Image (cartoon, rainbow, N blue to C red):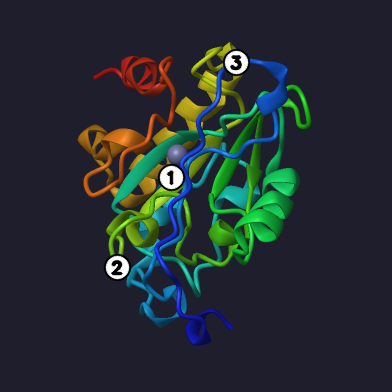
Amino acid sequence: MLSKVSFLCGFLLVFGGCGSNNTRMPEVVDYPTCEPESVPPKVIESQSKLTSVQSNVPGDWLPPSRVEKKWTAIVIHHSATESGNAAIFDRMHREENHWDGVGYDFVIGNGTDSGNGQVEVTFRWREQVAGAHCGGTPGNWANIDAVGICLVGNFNCTAATAKQMQSLSKLVRFLQKRYGISTSRIYGHSSTPGARVTDCPGRNSPVAGLKQMLGS
Ligand SMILES: [Zn+2]
C-alpha cells in the first residue's frame, strides 16, 4: 500500500540529446512525498452544474461522479521520448521508478505507439487519485490538484504534432469548463509553481501554442 511506504523525494535528472539512444529515457518526474491515499478527495457537491459541459467529449474523459475531485490547474508535460503510449509509460514508471503506475492523468500519442492525437486516459484520472508528474515538496499541490497531461515526444528535438495540439486543446477546454480552470492556471511542468528544475516540456514547449489556440 502506498500509505505504508515512506517515499523519499527521489529526483532523477535525465540529460540527453536528440540521438536515438535516448528513446527510452522517461521525462524528468519525481514522486510526491505526500501519501496520495491520505488526501481526502475534494468531491464536487453539485454534479448538476457539470452536466452542461459533458457533450461532445469521449465518455472516458468523464470521471465517476462518486470520486470526482475539484481540479484547480493543468500541467503539461512531454514524454522526453520519441515514442511511447500510456501502457509503455505505465510499465516504465512501475519498473524503473517503482511507482504504482504511470504518473499522468492523460497521455496524447504522436502516432508511434498510439494514434497521432489519440488521448489515452490513465488509472489516475479514472480513479481521481493524485498524480506523480510534478514532484518536489511534501504534499505537492500540483500532483494533488492539477491534471497531468503528457504529450508523447521529445520536444527538445521535435514539436507536438498538429493532431496532438488539436487533442490537447480539446481536452484542456473540456477541463477548463468542467472545473472552472483559468488559462493562467495552465502550466508547463518547468513553470509550475513549486516544481523542481526541469526542462519539461522541452525547448519547443507546446504551452504557448496551446494558449494561443485557447484564445488568450
Ligand atoms: Zn514533466
Between the C-alphas of marks 1 and 2, the distance is 34 Å
Read off the residue under disc 2.
138
Q: Considering the image in quadrants, where does the N terminus appear?
A: bottom right
Front one among 21 and 64: 21
Question: Which numbered tag is attached to residue 53?
Answer: 1
Identity of the residue furthest to the right in this view: 113
Front one among 4 and 175: 4
From the image, state whether disc 1 or disc 2 is nearer to you: 2
Identified at 29% across, 52% down, the residue is 72
Ligand 1: which quarter? top left
Read off the residue under disc 3.
18
Q: Earlier in the sequence, mark 1 or mark 2?
A: 1
Q: Considering the image in quadrants, where does the C terminus appear?
A: top left
Residue 173: x, y in percent?
40, 34
Q: Is mark 1 within 8 Å of ligand 1?
A: no
Residue 83: x, y in percent?
71, 27
Amino acid identity at mark 3:
Cys
